[in-house]
Amino acid sequence: MLLLALLQEETDKALFLEFHGRYERKLYAVAFHILKSPALAEDAVQDAMLQIITHFEDFKRIKQKSCHEIAPWCITIVKHAALNILRREGRSGSLEENWNAPTPENVEDESAYDRLVALIRAMPEQYRTVLELKFVLEWGNREIAKALNLSPGTVGVRVQRGRELLIRRLEQEGYSRGTV
Amino acid sequence: MEQSELDGMLRSALLDAERADWAHVLSGPLPEPDFSPRYCRRRRQMREDPFAYAKRRTRPLWRQAVRIAACILLLAGISLGGFLAVSPEARAWVTQRLSVIWGDKFAFFTAPEHQDRLPDLSQYRPAYIPEGFELVREWAPHEFFFTLTYRDGAGDYIDYNTASLSSSSTFEFIVDSEHSDSREIQINGLPATLLSSHTEGWPSHLLWEDAQAGIAYCITAMLDDETLIRVAESVTCVTG
């Protein structure tokens, strides 16, 4: 039993080291783009790697399900690590209620899914952040609240509101709820 | 569409949005960062044993603090109890400053002071910083704490931290003691603790407090003892 556990740990370690070798500079590039500081970007990469290790079961599950999801998943983690540093330094923005969503070229040509992706990309970061933490990293409201210095109730409201904003915008643009 | 299906689609869309957002960064040539020695050191430790490293790094500070506080209470109760009861001088010393080595940890605590006015911590800075170091970060999350970070071209750093000895807060500093030797010294006539690194790539720490100014100081730096002490002794109130 102990031998199996040790073997599993060695396998996990090898998996992590392979990931670390492949992604370290990519995560650094994202962190540096946000923070504009080599020292802070290093801190963000370090924080992100720690999170990935502590959520290694999630990492393995995602990799097994679809290895294409690993890149955006770990980018989400390092992005939040970098935004967290910005928040600590008081450099994050205020909550915006509205956003300038890009106008659709032609509803007939663009699928509801593609449109949803485009709307998310233009969404205010504060709503997008809670949606990412909730649905991509699968954190609970309490964990998100702690990370963002909000009350769990506020997190719940933002998740609900962020989701509704996206659906309402899609419906306003002529996409039916059934296709969303 | 069911809520769970919608949430599943939302998750996929969030991931695709992330991929699209960062495509320009990731598809271009990746940077060849000149990582700092501090980062390289941490990376080496992480890669040696990622899971043990993460466990060490994410261990809640409060758990360490509670364990150390329990030790202090025990020590105070057993060794000092009788003495404190009869000696006001001893009581005054203990309530000002406590440091203890517990297992592989060194802990330094200040006790709350009763002050009418909090010092402006940002006014207290080292007048001497070794050549080659530049100020890269100045951070004051609140009025009780102020920090300056200096770095040099080789990635070595000096972290200068100050905390006010207020009536409502204590300053706690906990560090691994296995990489340093502790000794008591004086900084401008004030008692101080120097944790001198004996391990390549680990910083030294210097801690002291100035009860008159109402400030606790902690400098963590990749410097030799003499230079570190010189930096500490140069700390002055810049507005005089």
Image: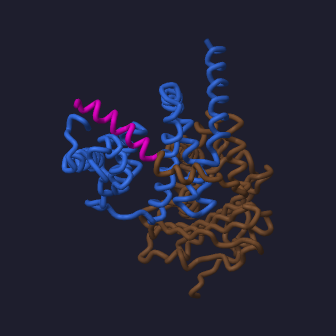
Chain colours: A blue, B brown
x then y, percent, for residue A138: 39, 36
Question: For residue B6: magenta?
Answer: yes
x then y, percent, for residue A179: 24, 36
> Residue at (19%, 40%) from the top-left corner?
A176
Q: Nearer the viewer, residue B168 or A69?
A: A69
Quadrant that contains the C terminus of chain A: top left
The quarter holding residue B223 reads bottom right
Q: Is residue B159 left or right of residue B6?
A: right
Quadrant that contains the N terminus of chain A: top right
Question: For residue A73: magenta?
Answer: no
Q: Is residue B179 left or right of residue B168?
A: right
Instruction: Determine if residue B127 is in view.
Output: yes
Q: Nearer the viewer, residue B85 or A127?
A: A127
> Residue at (22%, 43%) from the top-left corner?
A175
Residue A53 against residue A61 in the figure, above or below = below
Q: Which residues are magenta?
A: B1-18
Q: Nearer the viewer, residue B215 or B122?
A: B122
The outermost residue toward the bottom is B240
Q: Is residue B14 left or right of residue B62?
A: left
The outermost residue toward the top is A1
The quarter holding residue B236 reads bottom right
Residue B217 against residue A28 in the figure, above or below = below
Residue B111 against residue A45 in the figure, above or below = below
Give the total number of marks visible in the rendering: 0
x then y, percent, for residue A153: 25, 47
The quarter holding residue B90 reads bottom right
Main secondary-structure element of the magenta-colored stretch = helix
x then y, percent, for residue B111: 51, 60
Q: Nearer the viewer, residue A109 or B223?
A: A109
> Residue at (58%, 59%) from the top-left corner?
A40
